[in-house]
Structures are given as C-alpha cells and as structure tokens.
Amino acid sequence: MANFNLNINGKNTQIDVDPSTPVLWVLRDHLNLVGTKYGCGIAQCGTCTIHLGDVAVRSCQLPVSVVGNQAITTIEGLSENGDHPVQQAWLEHDVPQCGYCQAGQIMNAAAFLKHNQDPTDEQIDAAMNGNICRCGTYTRIKKAIKTAANSENA
C-alpha cells in the first residue's frame, strides 16, 4: 500500500491503495464517485473515460501510481450543475437510451472539444471512435457534439 495525494474534481484527496490499483477502482470503490462506469476492463469501450489534465483517458487501465500531480476530472466534476455545453447538448438531442456509456461519451467529447472547437463530421468520428454505445445512439451523439461546439461556452 502507498499513500497518494490526488486532485480529483478540484479537491485534494489522500488515498492509501496499492500503486497498481486502476484509477477507476480508486474512484468507485474508495471515493464513491460512481459516475465513471466499468465497461470492458481493457480500455477498449470508453465507458470509464475521465480527464487527466485536459486529456481523455481510460481509467480502467490507468494505475493510480502514474497520475502524479495531474488533475483528475470525472463526470461528477465536469460541471457543478450539469450545465457544461456537452451535457446540455446531450439533453437537447435526447442522446441516452440506456445511459450506461454516456458519462464516458460526454467526457471524451468534452476533452475533444477543448482542442477542436469547430470539428468536421470526420473529426468527430475519429475522436469518438472507441467509445462504444450498445444502443447505437451515434447519430445523436454526433449532433450533440456539433451543438456543443457551436455553443459559445464550449
């Protein structure tokens, strides 16, 4: 076991865990931040996507020992009141069906839009490739990303 000082959603948190523990399990099992979901466990589906700094990463394969002093943002920390432009666009376009993958989809889209505020359809497809939605809401996801990109707050 080792002691880690983590910045999660803007708050400093100390946690004593095995250094190889994936960040997903630190969030869910130790800190009760359960918005980040477990999907495949091999970083292929995108359900567990969080931000490490400004980059979208898969938390199921990210050992807590490599986080260092980089800030972690989960879906709970993306916005205080669910008013992030991506979250608002998701509601506007009624994106979720079952909703299981949506936190990961939103986190990936938000990180993508930080670096590309006027994406083409092809760029959206490339950026979101690997975030799997078993319900197949990809058309609505793309529309929501376009709407969020056009928002003045994105």
Image: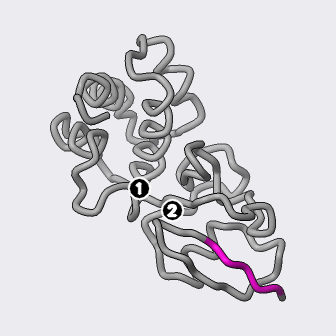
- Can you say whether 150 is above or below 52 in the image? above
152 relative to 52 in the view: left or right: left
Q: Is residue 70 magenta?
A: no
The magenta segment: 2-6
Q: In the image, residue 14 lies at what x, y percent?
A: 63, 85
Q: Nearer the viewer, residue 76 or 139?
A: 76
- Look at the image and tell me in which quarter the C terminus lies: top left
Determine crowd level at label 2: few under 14, some 14-19, many 20+ residues with C-alpha closer than 10 A. many
The disc at residue 100 is 1
Q: In the image, residue 83 lies at what x, y percent?
A: 22, 51
Q: Nearer the viewer, residue 89 or 85?
A: 85
Quadrant in the rendering for residue 62:
bottom right
| Residue ID at (72%, 62%) | 67
Q: Earlier in the sequence, mark 2 or mark 1?
A: 2
Whether label 2 touches label 1, CB < 8 Å: yes
| Residue ID at (41%, 58%) | 75
Q: In the image, residue 24 lies at what x, y percent?
A: 62, 67
| Residue type, numbered disc 1 | Tyr
For mark 1, give the secondary structure: loop
| Residue ID at (26%, 35%) | 153
How far apart, in angstroms, are the residues tagged by discs 2 and 1?
A: 7 Å
The disc at residue 142 is none
| Residue type, numbered disc 2 | Lys
Which residue was labeled with disc 2? 37
141 relative to 47 in the view: left or right: left
